[in-house]
Structure formats: structure tokens, C-alpha cells
Amino acid sequence: MAKDNGQTRAKKDEPSDSPEPRNGLELGSGFEIVAREDFSDVTYLLEILHPAMAKAAKPGQFVIVIAHEHGERIPLTIADFDRDRGTVTLVIQAVGKTTREMQQNCRVGTKLFGLVGPMGVPSHIGGAAKVICVGGGLGVAPILPQARAWKESGAYVIGVVGFRSKELMFWDDKFNRYCDEFIVCSDDGSIGIKGLITLGIEQAIQRHPDIDEVVAIGPPIMMKACAETTRPHGIKTVVSLNPIMVDGTGMCGGCRVSVEGKMKFGCVDGADFEVHKVDFDELLLRLSRFVPKEKEALEQWQKDCRIQQQAGELIDQQSSQS
Ligand code: FAD
Ligand code: FES
Ligand code: MG
């Protein structure tokens, strides 16, 4: 497995991200963040020191992160790993309370309270001569190690990625390195094909009627759209499912998915599944089960942040007056 974190290291945090303890992020114990890169106002990369995990990790696996002592458990795909540096890389989209809190507090030198894994069944790589690797949104980063592994298996690899606009694009140099063809789609047409990622998949299928497999990672709605694009062509399509996960070990049942009418657990039977066999409507319904509570948690956290900021400003004011 090749390792390439050059870009990550080159764009490490600025000095302002010095390792001060912030909002419960411990400096003393846990798993040290050794690099951070921000791709946009919502997408950020963390490289974390964990030699044992870096040694064991395989493409398609994920970790459970607990950011601080009172933090919730959230699953995140291992977007990359470097066995020499002993690090694993996560690429995170700030969508709710925990991922925004991490965006605010996870700086180089701070430590994550818990990092459990690698979890899940590694992706099955091999047995296909021509593969399309599709990544959209939070899936762009974790599709890279898959593309790389397929390339190393000897397959002809076509990468298809989607961004909102050119400014948000990242890792195009890495994709170009590992993909025989690389197709970019953007919502606003500022780069590549204007439109949804499914247009890029269609284009690749038109050019190559002999595609053996499509591998897709991204938001659930995107993976559903990929499924509908490949279904008429009868192409095997594997996606990395993201049902709600709590323990990640098959104990809680939170990640139940229906696959060909049988109950499977996303965490121990996946996260990869053949998408045409998955009951996607049920998955989407289950993903929205806790939305009111998630909204409440985010609002409370934002309120706490405002109070903290106001208290800080008051202290600054008082000390400048005295
Ligand atoms: P919340 O406001 O709590 O939730 C926002 C939405 O995220 C929810 O509506 C729900 O759809 C989903 N979500 C919330 N809690 C969980 C949970 N415990 N498990 C799964 N989904 C949840 N995101 C990334 O940005 N990068 C990744 O690499 C990544 N990999 C993932 C791999 C797997 C196997 C799974 C299952 C999910 C992955 N996710 C990834 C999604 C990520 O776990 C959620 O975005 C995160 O938990 C949201 O937490 P929050 O508190 O910020 O948002
Ligand atoms: Fe609990 Fe899968 S996360 S069973
Ligand atoms: Mg949450």
C-alpha cells in the first residue's frame, strides 16, 4: 500500500493552532493529532498518531471516535493510513454538534479521547479488470485508498469525484496519480462536468461498456443515485453504507440494514454492501430517526459557545481596564 501524506504535512496548522487545551480536549492522554488541513469551511482533515491502527488498517474500514471525555461516539472512515509515520487520516464534514465541535477544537498537538478500530470488513479488492471509483462529499477522501488499491491489483481505474465548485476540490493530484482516467463533476460547472456525479458515471460507462464494478462512497442520497445509474446497465455496484452506529461491534443494533430481505449490521457485516440489494428507503428513514435530538444538541452547543465567548470578552475587557 502506497503512503502519501505529503500534502497533509505540507499544509499543517498555522502557529495559531498551538496545542492549547480547548473545551475538554485533553493534552495528557489519548491519540495525538499530528496534522490538520482544512479543505473548505466544512471539510477538514485530521492525521492522528496511532501506530497499531496504522499497521492494521485496510481500505474500507472505519473507526469510532470519541473526541473528549463527555463526547458521543461517531463513526468515521479511515481515509488514509501511513504505516511508516504510524498515522491514520480522517476527513470530516462538519454537519452537526460533534463534527462542528471537533472542527473548532481539534488542533495539532491536541488529543482525541478515544479512537477505536479499525472496524468493519475491509473492502474486497480484486477480480475486476475495469472499475469506476466514485466519491462525492464526505466520500471523496475515502475513495482514494480504494482507487489506489484497485490500481495496485492491476485494474484499469476510472475515478469520478464531485464537488460544489472548483475552489472546494482537493487531492486531484493524488487521484490523477492512481487513476487511468479522472472525471470531475461540479455543481456550478467551474470545473469538469457541470452537474451531478451521476453524469460522470454515465460518461464513463458510455466510453467503457465493459465496466466490471462501480465502487461509490458519499452521502446516502448520492449512493442511491449511483445505484439507479448503474442498475439499468447491470453493473455490480458496491457502496460504503453509513447507517447510525453506536458501539460499532454488532451489540446495539443501531446500524441494522435490510439486504435482500435479510437483516445485516452495517458495522460488522459492512460497511461495504452491494447497493442493488439494499433497502435504501428504509436506510434513509432510519438515518432521520434522531434529527430533533441532533438539532437540539447542536443548538445547545452553539448557545454554550456564545456564552463562553461573551464571558471571555468580558474578562478581556475587565483586565484591560484594571
Ligand atoms: P448530528 O447532528 O448528530 O447528525 C447529523 C446526521 O449524521 C444525522 O442525521 C445522521 O444521519 C448522521 N449521524 C449522526 N450520528 C451518527 C452516528 N452515530 N453514526 C452514523 N451516522 C450518524 N462522516 C464524515 O464526515 N467522514 C467520514 O469519513 C465518515 N465516515 C463514516 C463511516 C461510517 C461507517 C458511518 C456509519 C458514518 C460515517 N460518517 C462520516 C458520518 C458521520 O458519522 C456523521 O456525519 C456524524 O456522526 C455526525 O455527527 P454530528 O454530531 O456532527 O451530527
Ligand atoms: Fe451497534 Fe452496529 S453499531 S450493532
Ligand atoms: Mg451527533
Image (spheres, rainbow, N blue to C red):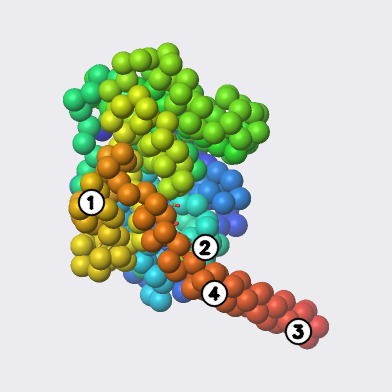
Rendered view: 226 above or below 192: below
* Residue 168 at x, y percent in the picture: 59, 39
Q: What element carries label 1?
A: loop
Q: Which residue is drawn at 48% across and 60% down?
A: 99
* Residue 238 at x, y percent in the picture: 30, 37
Q: In which quarter of the image is residue 113?
A: bottom left
Pointer 3 local density, CA inside 10 Å: few below 14, some 14–19, many at least 20: few
Q: Closer to the observer: label 1 or label 2?
A: 1
Rendered view: 309 above or below 95: below
Mark number displayed over residue 96: 2
Mark number displayed over residue 261: 1
| Viewer-proximal residue among 277 and 135 | 277
- Tell whether 184 sits left or right of 246: right
Q: Residue tagged by mark 4? A: 296
Q: Can residue 262 be seen in this view?
A: yes
Disc nearer the start of the sequence (2/3): 2
